[in-house]
Image: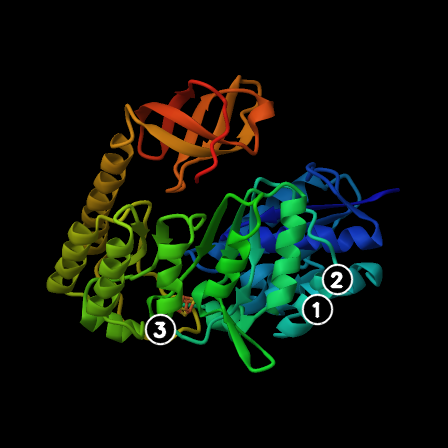
Amino acid sequence: MENTIFIKTFGCQMNEYDSNRIYDSVRKIGFKRTANKENATCLVINTCHIRDKAKEKIYHEIGRIKKIYRNKSKPIMIIAGCVAQAENQEMFKREPYIDIVIGPQSYHKINNLLKNYISNKKEEETEFDTISKFKHFDNIENLNKKISAFLTIQEGCDKFCHFCVVPYTRGPEYSRPFNKILYEAETLIKNGAKEIILLGQNVNAYSYCDHSKEYRISNLINELEKYSELKRIRYTTSHPRDMTDDLIDCYASNKKLMPLIHLPIQSGSNKILKSMNRKHTVEEYMKIYERLKKINSEIEFSSDFIVSYPGETDRDFNDTLNLVKKIKFINSYSFIFSPRPGTKSSSLKTLDIEISKERLNELQKYLFNHQINKNRSFEGGFVDVLVENKIKDQPKLFGRNKYLNSVIFNGDSKDIGKMLKVKIESTNSSTLFGKIENNKEIRAA
Ligand code: SF4
């Protein structure tokens, strides 16, 4: 019987990238990717630990899987990702259905684990072996054929914000060799990518030294700019402290670098930023904003916010609102603080939940309004859209504008991968709807 593998991915783009690379790897030992989770030899849940109740979600998912496979042979059950890293052996105790627990920096071991799999023998791999991992994957072709492709350039974090599990689940900052990244980018472009999104937990902290020359993310952006088939470059997620001059200058010189910057600030209060150990102030953030706006007034910001961090007063919260009114972020993420086990802030006293909900509602009202207003500003005009795919069973295409808005419009499959001008007729909070007047491809992003 053929071995098949199905991966359910939770969380961020880095998990999505990792899942695809796991598929690329296990293919080498004869495991075929399947879209049918009801009949797989191996099931992987690639987990995320950022949001609340992440663990519970996994055990619920396993409960559903157990029902599906009640009368079939049991699949090899693997838990991967950040929850696997954080919980390791504990997972076997709570759910004996799990066979393998593998952390994000051990994915290179998955082929051996599967090859040597023995029923009922529990295996756990949670070492921070990032160098070996990327060495393994550098020798495995990235088979992603998407128009917009993710490319991990950096992993881990050394900043230790007091609320965040990433330094514990992904380990210390590691930057992949410059030439290996370019090689993978070339493969993606050869496979049809028109947009590359550079990924890292601290993507703009990318720093790779070769023969005493330091390569930064700006060098990668400048190199990618040279590929004529590539139309757009993005990167995420950044830290304000790593918005260095060379990266800021890229916005003046690179036409393919998109003018939406996701730059988490978390709070508009310096007192709270300090207590979060964010290592930057509101003023420093504003300086970055102003410099970038001066270079290109079209640049927009999106961000992450934590509301009701322990110790946040009404005044601190108002500082956040004031910042949001000034910057008018689009597409932001906002959550009420929830403690993550093992982090410094997990022992701090949380705020009253009703007050927290009120604050979140108020913040989201502003964020949502900015987003709606921005979307409305496109109505009646043209936007440049990179076409990503056709919508199933409809004569419609899906693509994105430069601010990552979803755009849906008339068209057919032959336009996938093209950059088209789309006239926007209506919008809602997340999507622009329009039509193309001709499908002549445009050159600019
Ligand atoms: S910089 Fe980002 S990834 Fe690192 S600890 Fe802070 S929030 Fe987490």
State the SS at label 2.
loop
Mark 3 vs mark 1, CA separation in Å: 31 Å
CA–CA distance between discs 3 and 2? 36 Å
Q: Say if disc 1 is inside 8 Å of ligand 1.
A: no
Residue at screen point 30% across, 26% down: 381
Residue 322's place in the image compared with 408, above or below, is below
Residue at the spot 34% in from the left edge and 61% down from the top edge: 338
Q: Secondary structure at mark 3?
A: loop
Q: Quadrant of the N terminus?
A: top right
Name the residue: 29% across, 61% down.
266
Q: Which residue lies under the disc numbered 2?
A: 139
Q: Are marks 1 and 2 in contact (CB under 8 Å)?
A: yes
Residue projecting furthest to the right: 1
Mark linked to residue 162 = 3
Q: Which label's residue is closer to the chain start, 3 or 2?
A: 2
Q: Position of residue 204 (x, y in %)?
A: 44, 65
Q: Is residue 254 visible?
A: yes
Q: Which residue is mark 1?
A: 135
Q: What's the residue type where badge 1 is placed?
A: Lys
In the rendered image, is residue 59 in sight?
A: no
